[in-house]
Image (spheres, coloured by chain):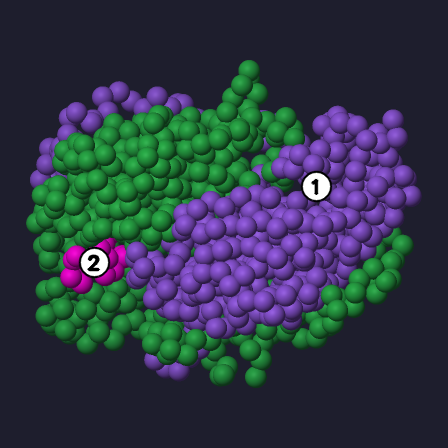
Chain colours: A green, B purple
Amino acid sequence: MQNNTDFPLLFELSQPGRTGYSLPPLDVPETDMTEAFDSAYIRTEPAALPELSELQIIRHYTALSRRNYGVDSGFYPLGSCTMKYNPKINEDIIRMDGFSHVHPYQDPKTAQGALELMFDLQEQLKEITGMYDVSLQPAAGAHGEWAGLMMIRALHEKNGETQRTKVIVPDTAHGTNPASATVAGFEAVTVKSNEQGLVDLDDLRRLVGEDTAALMLTNPNTLGLFEKDILEMAEIVHEAGGKLYYDGANLNAIMGYTRPGDMGFDVVHLNLHKTFTGPHGGGGPGSGPVGVSEELAAFLPKPVVRKQDGIVILDEDRPESIGRVKPYYGNFGINVRAYTYIRTMGPEGLKRVSEYAVLNANYMMRRLSEVFELPYTQHCKHEFVLSGRKQKKLGVRTLDIAKRLLDFGYHPPTIYFPLNVEEALMIEPTETEAKETLDSFIDTMLEIAKDAEENPEIVQEAPYTTIVSRMDETTAARKPVLRYIPE
Amino acid sequence: MDFRYLPMTEQDKKDMLQTIGVKDTEALFADIPDAVRLKEPLQIKEPKSEGELKAELAALANQNVTMKTHASFLGAGVYDHYIPSIVDHVISRSEFYTAYTPYQPEISQGELQAIFEFQTMIAELTGMDVANSSMYDGGTALAEAATLSAGHTKKKKIIVSEAVHPESRQVIDSYCRGQHLEVVTIPHKDGVTDLEALQEAIDEETASVIVQYPNFFGQVEALADIRTILDTQSKAMMVVSSNPLALGFLTPPGNFGADIVVGDTQVFGIPAQFGGPHCGYFASSSKLMRKLPGRLVGQTKDEEGRRGFVLTLQAREQHIRRDKATSNICSNQALNALASSVAMSALGKQGLADMAYLNVQKAQYMKKQLEAHGLEVVFQHSFFNEIVIKVNGDIHTLQDHLVAQGFIGGYHLGRTDDRMKDHMLIAVTEQRTKEQIDTFVREVAAFHAK
């Protein structure tokens, strides 16, 4: 189904007999494998991998990279994803042999450098979050959510409170929250937001009870608004016997200003690939450490990194632990990057990160609200949500606005999320963007809004300058083609 | 102190505050109740300049023994394979590593196509119909296979072979506890899954049977026999965890009728990194396509009829289905999947088979050498690139001795199994030369004979 203008797949470039690899010659006496193996277990047909020379492979992937857009390409205000600059020193540090080529099963005394870094990262994260203890095990945010909820479940079970089966999640929450509740064996229950975009305390009071296991909360929430009644919420949940879970997706807004531990949270997960400059990798890998209060510390996933008499050890002897959540010791490679970032910024730097992330967001919000509807008008934190309702009435949907932004060289904001804002545009500038960049983006948005009024078809039919136009996603889902099949 | 990642000037700040209509940035944080405000600076380490920090962290890195400073015979799920130079050059292109999930297909065709190619290569290698865009790692992919099988079959019993990686088994336990599933472990017999025990354990309540191929001890499981047991006794699914490099030599699980094949592509272009991030893969038969966890990329056309790629079948995923989703996975291991794609492309059809062949040949040679030097190789089934030996003497002392001689010794099986306190699992890859193997064997044999 390739036509002349289609960009070729690796498999279409392949020619029998080419290779892009050099292997050492076999330097040991050769064994007859038909004697060592039952012939039914020896592969007869090699896997149909592409056959290409090294330059062909490099050209292919270089071309693919040019068909992609990252933070280094331009402004990427994808709300809730914290698309900040990914420092280059981080990439240099993880590529040091002493970090990248250490085996997880080496004797710990031969890996003290790696373990020392993990231990110190735990210490730094404990202080930043105000939690009693931290584990670096979870591989990503959602993985941390699940691990955190499993710990809460273990605590309730230990206390004989097995009837605590419900996890309360705000209607604005990220989809992973209810999904994590389900895979941790709970039932997710939704608490409403009020007119200010904050958790409705009356609804929360109505929902909590004997069956409440936890409330999962992002603060600031996914609308970018600080849950100012956090202490009251903590009291409501705790009095009912539930625990308070902090989704660290939005930690970038509050570092050095307040800490989840001080707000009364019992469990926290962090997204090191967001706030702590991961990078995002085209979708991962991430890293999702969890922090806990003292009451929950015994349940942390194992192993936990400990220091004893100046030696760092991996503590596996944890009878109350929820167990192992992934093989080995978490996404060390991402943790090294996060550690490098924290050590680059220090206490004052991290506070300024949050200060400027919030300042940038408020500046953009005020300027854009001249033209776009702003459903919640209080100061935001690191991100804000606009509604494209006004433009929709003119026949221009938020999707169209997003597509039109592509023509101006921007990655669009998150769209149609959170679910309680019609035609939502969720914008998170981050602190690493200069004012000029914000101004250019704002000017572009205002121009698009003007076009929506005067020449809506320009916006409706965008984009014009991208290498492909809008994709037929319906057919993609109806008749899925998930792999290349030769004609 | 100046911060090179923060472009805000005093003038910018002043102008922006004026536009917002507040006096200072404190006003923007006024909704944080005083009771929870941090009054002191964070008690974390003071910042360092780029040069100072690099020097400090290099000193830390240099404290570690590595697979570069020492010849590694350690595997147990993480292997020392050669990483072609092109891999790091490709994944260092910032259009890839500074992007996120390709939500906007018009400006993400590069990532989307790379994932589509990855999905294709994994499906080819495993002999399965479809594969997803990646999972966190082999262990969590296996645990998700267990929970998927329970969801699909509506049954609650998961049978796991003891010859599956012990840490993967522990992850399966944790995930299954989450979803109130029962995990039954069946023993191994002489290093492979005990088929009689399997036959006894399997019943109408069984959702799936999980084996590893080659298994944790390097031995090749009799997948054909396991399939026969499943076919005659229940409707349980066959889940196989496979080192994908081994599938360059071994008949792929798909040919034996596996329903799900998972594993880790660390063997293709991903450094050990003290255990992560690596890259899980998840492949299945087409009937499970709409139940797969994680992201899937599909081929389609744009408005002008040009071929392109999009994230598809998203109705499975947490951001659409929320609490009804069967998995909560969101971000995955895209960049590592890209690294593995580049490594697999470089190897190509013949190279991957050749590399697997080198591994299996060198392992055969090592086994013969060990036996010739009086060591007992305890399991005698066909094996890929790992074998188990029994050593006289304290294994910790042996490990120390090997490090002193420039080697990283094998995996001490006593770590997770009290019955195997004097057993070591040794891996050999195409990276190990004959000379290294010979010296290593001599050192171990000398220790053993003492």
**Of residues A15 and B115, the one drawn nearer to the viewer in this rendering:** B115
Q: Main secondary structure of the magenta part?
A: loop
- Which amino acid lies under the numbered mark 1 shown in the image of this protein? Leu
Q: Measure the alpha-carbon separation of dots 1 and 2.
A: 49 Å
Q: Which mark is residue B106?
A: none
Query: Please, is residue A128 above or below residue A445 in the view?
Result: above
User: What's the chain of the residue with tag 2?
Assistant: A
| Residue occupying the point 57% across, 63% down | B238
For mark 1, give the secondary structure.
Answer: loop
From this viewpoint, is residue A69 visible?
no
Q: In this image, A47 relative to A185: left or right?
A: right
Q: Residue furthest right?
A: B372
**Of residues B258 and B207, the one drawn nearer to the viewer in this rendering:** B207
- Which amino acid lies under the numbered mark 2 shown in the image of this protein? Leu
Quarter of the image containing the C terminus of chain B? top right
What segment is highlighted magenta in the picture?
A413-431
Residue A444 appears at what percent x and percent y?
Answer: 22, 60
Quarter of the image containing the N terminus of chain B? top left
Residue A422 appears at what percent x and percent y?
Answer: 15, 61
Q: How many numbered callouts?
A: 2
Residue B444 belongs to magenta span: no
Residue B223 falls in image quadrant: bottom right
Q: Residue furthest top?
A: A309
Q: Which residue is mark 2?
A: A419
| Residue occupying the point 44% across, 46% down | B177
Q: Which residue is mark 1?
A: B74
**Of residues B133 and B170, the one drawn nearer to the viewer in this rendering:** B170
Query: Please, is residue A367 above or below residue B345 in the view?
Result: above
Q: Are marks 1 and 2 on the same chain?
A: no
Q: In this image, B81 relative to A361: left or right?
A: right
